[in-house]
Image: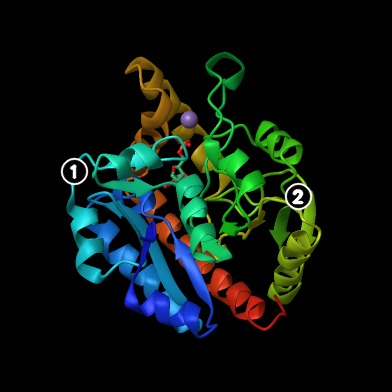
Amino acid sequence: MSLITLSPAVADAIENGRPVVALESTIITHGMPWPQNLDIARRIEATVRENGAEPATIAVINGTLHVGLEDAQIEALAKAERVAKLSRADLAVCMAEGRTGATTVAATMIAAAMAGIEVFATGGIGGVHRGADKSFDVSADLQELGYSPVTVVAAGPKAILDLPKTLEVLETGGVPVVAFGQDMLPAFWSRSSGLRAPLRMDDPAAIARAHRMRRRLGLPGGQLVANPIPEEAEIPRAEMTPVITRAMQDAEAHGIFGKDLTPYLLQRIYELTEGRSLDANVALVLHNAALGARIAAELVKLPT
Ligand code: PSU
Ligand code: MN
């Protein structure tokens, strides 16, 4: 029996060579608060469709790895409390035990690659946490980008991370980090991190060709496409810096670390900005969903 269960819509799209964009579920369960998370999850799927691709939201439900969820399954996940957060290390145990879990960027890439889906859109990826020289907290998302052949569209690493170290780890893992349409690396809420991106591309078709070229070269791993947040949704860096500092101090004071750290920081930043961080998050994730769909549409035109 197949290890993955495709929704009828995703199975049909794959079978007929139509573009598909993978979507993660941790953003729904751990990245955004109820009830906005449900509305946003639906809008992300709608945006992928409007841009000509089929969305495939990925999660483990009662031990089954689903690629493509029905609306009722998305709703159940959005409402559920204490859903497991699954990275590469957790996926097999969750499935073997018949449990339910939301997939992070790393686990979503693994499932997407198994299903033959080459593009995945999300908001932010995990990275090297600030203070990693002491905590050793480096997200498994970074090494996954070096293993699984999926192009991930995100808005750049969030400023809760150590951006220069994140770039270094990606380079070591052989991951192309491509800023879309500008020279500077975007930093989630801001269009620029103040750091130059290692690579720049301006055209979804070129990104699709580079993705295929990696495969032809026999290089494992994917690409990270960093898509700057739309200008009107940007939150100035000066405004976010004190908020991030405060959220990190609070995490430390509460002894939060490991898997809980990223969800804690996201929630705390949401509270401290009185919801503004979420509005920006929605704008950028929809923007990424649209770009992911455009890249997927170019990929299906290329010879395999
Ligand atoms: N960054 C965000 N939003 C998110 C995440 C990261 O801006 O929702 C989630 C993603 O699912 C990512 C995960 O894969 O957090 C990384 O967690 P960790 O740092 O524990 O590896
Ligand atoms: Mn971590």
Q: Nearer the viewer, mark 2 or mark 1?
A: 1
Q: Is residue 230 visible?
A: no
Residues under labels 2 and 1: Cα distance?
38 Å
Is residue 200 visible in the rendered image? The answer is: yes
Give the residue drawn at x 23%, y 63%: 73
- Colour scheme used in the picture? rainbow
Q: Identify residue type, mark 2.
A: Ala
The disc placed on residue 101 is none
**Ligand 1 within 8 Å of the CB at mark 2:** no
Label 1 belongs to which residue? 81
Q: Against 7, is 29 above or below?
A: above
Q: Which element carries disc 2, helix, strand or loop?
A: loop
Q: Could you tell which of marks 2 and 1 lies nearer the N-terminus?
A: 1
Front residue of this view, candidates 148 and 194:
148
Q: Is residue 13 above or below residue 134?
A: below
Q: Position of residue 276 (x, y in %)?
A: 38, 52
- Name the residue located 69 percent from the left edge and 34 percent from the top edge: 169
Secondary structure, mark 1, is loop
Q: Residue at x 65, y 76 (%)?
A: 299
Quarter holding residue 144: top right
Residue hosting label 2: 197
In the image, taking residue 53 as reference, residue 178 lies left or right, namely: right
Lateral position of residue 7 relative to residue 128, left or right: left
Disc 1 marks a residue whose amino acid type is Glu
Q: Position of residue 296 (x, y in %)?
A: 59, 74
Residue 270 falls left or right of residue 171: left
Picture coordinates of residue 166, whole percent (x, y):
65, 36
